[in-house]
Amino acid sequence: MKQLKVLAFTHKHIDLQDIGKFVICNQSLQVRLNAVKEKFEIPEIFYVGTCNRVEFVLCTAHSITPSFIKEFVKAVHPELSEEQLEGSLKKAQIYEDEVALEHLMRVSCSLESLVVGEKEILAQVRKSYECCKEAGFTGDFMRLIMTQLVKTAKEVYTDTKISKNPISVVSLAYRKLRDLNMCANARILIIGAGETNQNIAKYLQKHRYSNFAVFNRSIENSRKLAAELNGEAYSLEDLKHYKKGFDAIITCTSATEPIITNEIYQSLLNGETDKKVIVDLAVPNDTHPEVLSNNPIHFIEVKSLQEVANQNMQERYAELVYAEEIISKNIEEFKPLLRQRRIELAMKEVPLKIKEIKRTALDTVFAEEVGQLDEASKDTLEKILSYMEKKYISVPMIMAKEILVNNS
């Protein structure tokens, strides 16, 4: 596992607002990952971006030195200033080899989440991996890693109480929203049709809220979520001209600049002066600071959920011990699996080579002698050689696996 490396920027070492500087929007993901993959000749890579972490999982022989980190971040985010690049060195966390695998397992099992025990992170990691796999950024090594991550996480969620009555960022946000006692017919604008907003929309619909308008960059995704909510669908550009009023805004997009500026907010108010609600689960925030300072607003954001998350950590501390035992077991299980796979890959040419030797012997080296045999003798010779061919293929495979087991 020496080539497994993780470069991480997480809520544990960086202010949540600053994590947004390292986020890659979906539209530019392929271009940016291609840039670092080619520049550093990285065989396999995938990117994970959530509301409280940005991580790059690498399969590379490169040493993750400060200069590598700086050049890597610069290649991914050429728009960052020299000062921001220098700051990234202090904020980055590096994991290598077995420690990297343990870290990825802890992330997938939600031991590293803002709210321990929330299952959404596993789905997010899997989705990130699949996206990068489809784009051709990952290969056999990352496939093995991902399979073990999923297996480990499922065991943790099944065999411990760490996810019992889970409290995710979405559910915490909804609880705060529910405490404001909005009427069931409250006018709710949903900005962004991604997974986070889909999840919070399910809570709202379950609790009888019914008046929705969905805005999204892709009108197709906007229509899909609006159809599920029996609401209206708009493009993100329509936000500037929307005049039907609102009681609450729920926003979570991958934009790197605020979506809700003070100008747009005043337009959305359309003359209304009562106190509104904004639930902003984007990192960085979709809401411009001027909106908060110039208007009466109940504001709910990811950062404000930190205190509840810390309390949740204490309540589930005992379960962390059991989860860590499962992770340790899975790391030990993975080591021989990885070695076995490497042997299989190293020896995949053996059958082809043996077949090639057999054909050369029959068609070239002993062609004259074979040509003098009658048909029955030729058939017998072919059967003998085919039998030996199969044995020569299987014997080294079996011996290699026995050596692997004995060494383990």
Image (cartoon, rainbow, N blue to C red):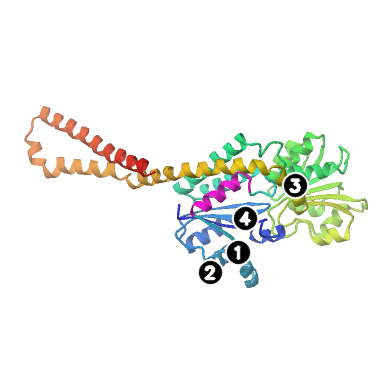
Who is closer to the viewer here, 43 or 402? 402
Q: Amino acid at mark 2?
A: Ser
Q: Residue at image x 63%, y 60%?
A: 22
Counting residues from the start of the chain, the first of labels 1 and 4 encountered is 4
> Where residue 16 sits in the image (x, y, percent)?
71, 57
Q: Estimate the spatial distance between the alpha carbons at disc 1 and disc 2, rounded to whole Å.
A: 15 Å
Q: Estimate the spatial distance between the alpha carbons at disc 3 and disc 2, rounded to whole Å.
A: 38 Å
Picture disc at residue 54: 4
What is the secondary structure assignment of the residue under circle 1? loop
Location of mark 3 (residue): 311
Image quadrant in which you'd find residue 386? top left
- Give yes or no for residue 52 being in the magenta stretch: no
What is the secondary structure assignment of the residue under circle 3? helix
Q: Amino acid at mark 4?
A: Val
> Where residue 383 sits in the image (x, y, percent)?
18, 30
Picture disc at residue 67: 2
Q: Say whether marks 4 and 3 touch (CB < 8 Å).
A: no
Residues shaded magenta: 97-111
Counting residues from the start of the chain, the first of labels 2 and 4 encountered is 4
Q: Amino acid at mark 1?
A: His
In the displayed structure, 91 sits above or below 400; it is below
Residue 247 visible in the current orientation:
yes
Q: Estimate the spatial distance between the alpha carbons at disc 4 and disc 3, rounded to whole Å.
A: 24 Å
What is the secondary structure assignment of the residue under circle 4? strand
Q: Say whether marks 1 and 4 touch (CB < 8 Å).
A: no
Location of mark 1 (residue): 77
Q: Residue furthest top?
A: 376
Counting residues from the start of the chain, the first of labels 3 and 2 encountered is 2
